[in-house]
Image (cartoon, rainbow, N blue to C red):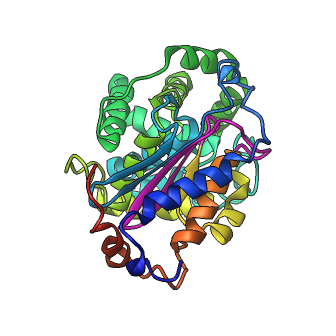
Amino acid sequence: MDDFETMPVFGVDAILRDVHAQALGREEGEVADYIPELAKADPAPFGIAVATSRGRLHEIGDTRIPFTIQSVSKALTYCMALELVGRAEVLRRVGVEPSGDPFNAIEFDPLTRRPYNPMVNAGAIAIAGILRDVHGDGAFGAVLTRFSEAAGRPLAMNEAVYSSEAATGHRNRAIGHLLVGAGALAEPMDSALDLYFRQCSIEVTAADLAVMGATIAHLGDNPITGRQVFDVAAVRDTQAVMFTCGMYDYSGNWAFDVGVPAKSGVGGGILGVVNRQLGIGTYSPRLDRKGNSVRGVEAFRLLSAEMGLHSFDLTNPGSAFVDSFFAEMPRG
């Protein structure tokens, strides 16, 4: 669409209906099964939610079905770590380079001997170690509180998924031991890994992801509650790493095709951020071979193309442009 300002006021909802209908036809992919509890997910639900920096929420489909946040959590905990210990200390433990490897690869940067980035398991476990080091026994409470503030409502952990992850997370334990050996994670390893399992097991909805994305897009300020949730400098760095590393080893294609910072999770969610403008959340549990939601990826691709959301799209010069489109939209 060349000019949002010429669109009728109902345009965004019409776009969401059209995108949802098109992406709904994608029935390939499988639910995650390497965590036994995730294998029980119903593959059918599909929802899309868009939250604006002005606090409006638009939804279609199954946007209120709870699912576990999984790797989407990595973006939020990275933002928290940057605030707590600063950029230099975080970079000492975790890099910012795309890895080109699967999210659960047992592979470190050969030069630094540190995890490539915080959006893969190795990096996220090291980040969990930072949060554990600062908050001690209160680390998970701090994470849950901050996630809840970003979503604008109280969230909770799914005990069954947490237990399932903790019982079967042998690969992540192997990564944890290597992190300790490399000096990227301080002992005791088990408490940091437990925090990682817990953060991944927090339940959210597609609507929650949209509001979380809008909070990041709105310079860390939740546009619905008005609460400042994240530091502005941390938000900037988090968006940069989401853009280059957030979609596992599909991140390059994502940046090319969709062009917005995003983070996916094997629970079926994707959180996207259009800086200063929108947060987008999708949910559909069928995953492709790289661990990304098939329908979610398609929905983002269509939304980006239809609404000119790509970071380098000439029709997307900034927040004033998209704000002019949403300003006339009635609340509700």
Residue 262 vertical placement versus 144 (above, below): below
Residue 114 appears in the picture as rendered: no
Quadrant of residue 178 in the image?
top right
- Residue at image position (76%, 47%) is 290
- Residue at image position (69%, 30%) is 43
- Residue at image position (49%, 46%) is 60
Residue 137: x percent and y percent? 36, 22
Residue 320: x percent and y percent? 31, 77
**Does residue 7 show up magenta in the picture?**
no
Closer to us: 290 or 101? 290
Closer to us: 196 or 209? 209
Closer to us: 61 or 141? 61
66 left or right of 298? Answer: left
Quadrant of residue 124 in the image?
top right
208 left or right of 74? Answer: left
- Residue at image position (21%, 46%) is 225
**Does residue 272 show up magenta in the picture?**
yes
Residue 12 vertical placement versus 203 (above, below): below
Residue 160: x percent and y percent? 55, 14
Residue 227 appears in the picture as rendered: yes
Query: Which portion, as a residue range, is magenta?
Result: 265-291
User: How many labels, in total?
Assistant: 0
156 left or right of 194? Answer: left
> In the image as oriented, which residue stretches furthest toward the bottom?
314
Residue 200: x percent and y percent? 53, 31
Residue 201 vertical placement versus 224 (above, below): above
